[in-house]
Amino acid sequence: MISLNKLKIFLKMDWKMKLLLVEAYFYLAIGRYLKSISFAKIAPSLGEHMKETSFEQTLSNKRVLSSISQAIHMMSRYTFWESQCLVKAIAAMKMLEKRNIESTLYLGTARDESGEMIAHAWLRSGPYYITGFEGMEKFTVVGKFAKKTGGKHHAKSSSP
C-alpha cells in the first residue's frame, strides 16, 4: 500500500513527472505482458539481434534518459506484478522508442555463489545505462538487441 507521505510527494511533483510516472507504469505492464510470451515471438520487436546502437553522447537526450530511468525505477516498486530487470529494460526501451531515441537491450548470464545459472537484462542509450546497471559487470552478454530509429535522435550503428 502506498503511504501517505509518498502520495504527498507524488502530488507535489510537476505534471510532466506525474505523466512520465503514469507512462512508466503503463510500459512496465506492457513489458510484463511481453515477458510472459515466448521469447522467440517477442525478440523481433526488440530490435536487430546481436547489434548495438552507437555509444556517442547526445547531450539533448541526457535529461530525457535520466527522467525515464528514474521513472522506471520508481514505478517498478509499485507494480502489483513482477517488474525486475527484463521488464524494466523492455519498458524503458518502449519509452525511448516513442521518443525516437535509440537503445540497446543486453541479456547476460552468470553463475551465483551456489553455482546456479542466473540471468540479467539491462538497457543502454548512447553512453548511458538506463536500467539494470546494478551488477551488470558480473554478467557475460549472450544477446543484444539494437532498437534503431529514423528520427532526429538517430545515431550511427556500431558493430562489435
Image: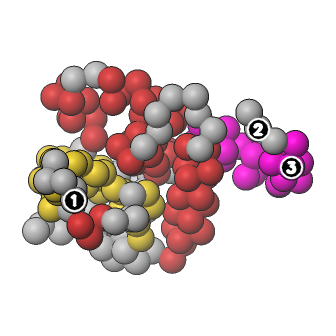
Q: How far apart are marks 2 and 1 (CA)?
A: 34 Å
Residue identified by numbered label 1: 113
Secondary structure of the residue carrying tag 2 is: loop
User: In percent of the image, x 41 and y 70: which residue is there?
Assistant: 128
Residue identified by numbered label 2: 2
Give the image quarter of residue 134: bottom left
> Which of disc 1 and disc 2 is earlier in sequence?
2
Residue identified by numbered label 3: 5
Secondary structure of the residue carrying tag 3 is: helix
> Any magenta on residue 35?
no
**Amino acid identity at mark 3:** Asn
Q: Give the range drawn in magenta.
A: 4-25
Point out residue 55 in the picture as x, y percentages from the top left corner. 30, 73
The answer to which of 88 and 99 lies nearer the viewer is 88
Residue count near mark 3 (Cα–Cα under 10 Å), binned few <14, some 14–19, many ≥20: few
Residue count near mark 2 (Cα–Cα under 10 Å), binned few <14, some 14–19, many ≥20: few
The quarter of the image holding the C terminus is: bottom left
- Single out the residue that lies furthest toward the front: 114
**Amino acid identity at mark 2:** Ile
Classify residue 4 as left or right of residue 66: right
**Amino acid identity at mark 1:** Glu
User: In percent of the image, x 53 and y 71: which residue is there?
Assistant: 62
